[in-house]
Amino acid sequence: MAELKMLNKKRIMDNVRLIFGMLKEYRFQFHRTVNVIDLTISESGNPDQRLLLTDYGIVFINGDHNPKADWHWQQFLAANGCHVLFKENPYLGEKCFLAASDGYGIDYTAYETWKEAEEAMENAYNDAKPSEWDESFEEMSYCGGGSALLYDNGDTVYSWEIIRSDLECRKKVPDSDYLTMKVRTLQIPRCDAIRIQKDFSSFTNAADIRKRYGDHYTETHTATFSDDVRVDIKLCVDYDDSGRTPIWAEAALYKDGVLDNCTYFYKSFFRTWELDCGGILYRVDVKAE
């Protein structure tokens, strides 16, 4: 759970003005303790209005209670992960939800980890494959990177997507407008995406990989961030005579051009990659165009 004290003062005051419809000539006296903001609003010719902004709602010290304003403040708390209901809540956690649709409805299934949800998605994708698959529909289908799309020979379109429930990633840096998590979406051109999806699929063998890439190969796709950070998503090939499929994916984070962090090897390219640098979580969502 994020703390109310971690939110930027300007962000809070902009929201208060929005809630109460106030203009800039209103004056504020702002006093903050751990999870209570003692706020006095003054306007020439009107009595001062004193409020306590808490992590569970607004306490109106003088003046009439305003349930609409209280509700909007609680919405603001919830959007920033600061509401007291998030504290030690047994219904929240770092769960993942797998959304599945056949074009007529959507079903959601909860999993404890991304890996469990990804395995369930891959199993569902493989189970839905038609016994005789038209090549054109097979090429348009894919599975990986947190989502999947399957064209069943033009009869039905199945889709899956993994959704995170990671409210902890929405904490704010104290007295800053920046999130502790920075996100980029890296879109791979369709022709390259189809090739990569096929290469990581279960029916591609080591001989096919070697024929296409040779014994050693690295292909890099880069996501850049505004603070001189870049994340390279790499397709790697290292062929040997073991018979295993010699292809994997990894991510590497560079700060000011110097390698700072890297991931383990993965058997999927189209996924969500996360790397930490200096206390900031950098997330890259790799998707096909």
Image (cartoon, helix red, strand yellow):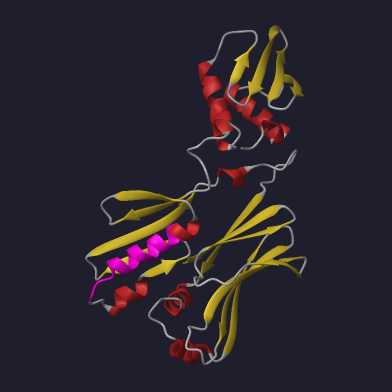
Q: Is residue 222 magenta?
A: no
Query: Do we see residue 26 in this rendering?
Result: no
Which quarter of the rendered picture does the N terminus lie within?
A: top right
Can the viewer see residue 268 in this picture? yes
Q: Is residue 42 left or right of residue 96?
A: right
Check the image and report above or below for 244 versus 61: below
Residue 212 in the figure: left or right of residue 183: left
- The residue depicted at 69 percent of the width and 7 percent of the height is 47
Residue 23 in the image: state x and y as whole percent. 66, 23
Question: Which segment did they paint magenta?
Answer: 117-131
Q: Quadrant of residue 248?
A: bottom right
What residue do we see at 50% from left, 40% from top?
92
Percent of width and height locating residue 42: 72, 14
Determine which quarter of the picture holds residue 33: top right
User: On the image, which quarter does residue 134 sit in?
Assistant: bottom left
Q: Position of residue 159 (x, y in %)?
A: 35, 60
Q: Is residue 237 left or right of residue 110?
A: right
Measured as percent of width and height from the top left, residue 252 is found at 66, 69
Residue at the (39%, 69%) spot, across then down? 142
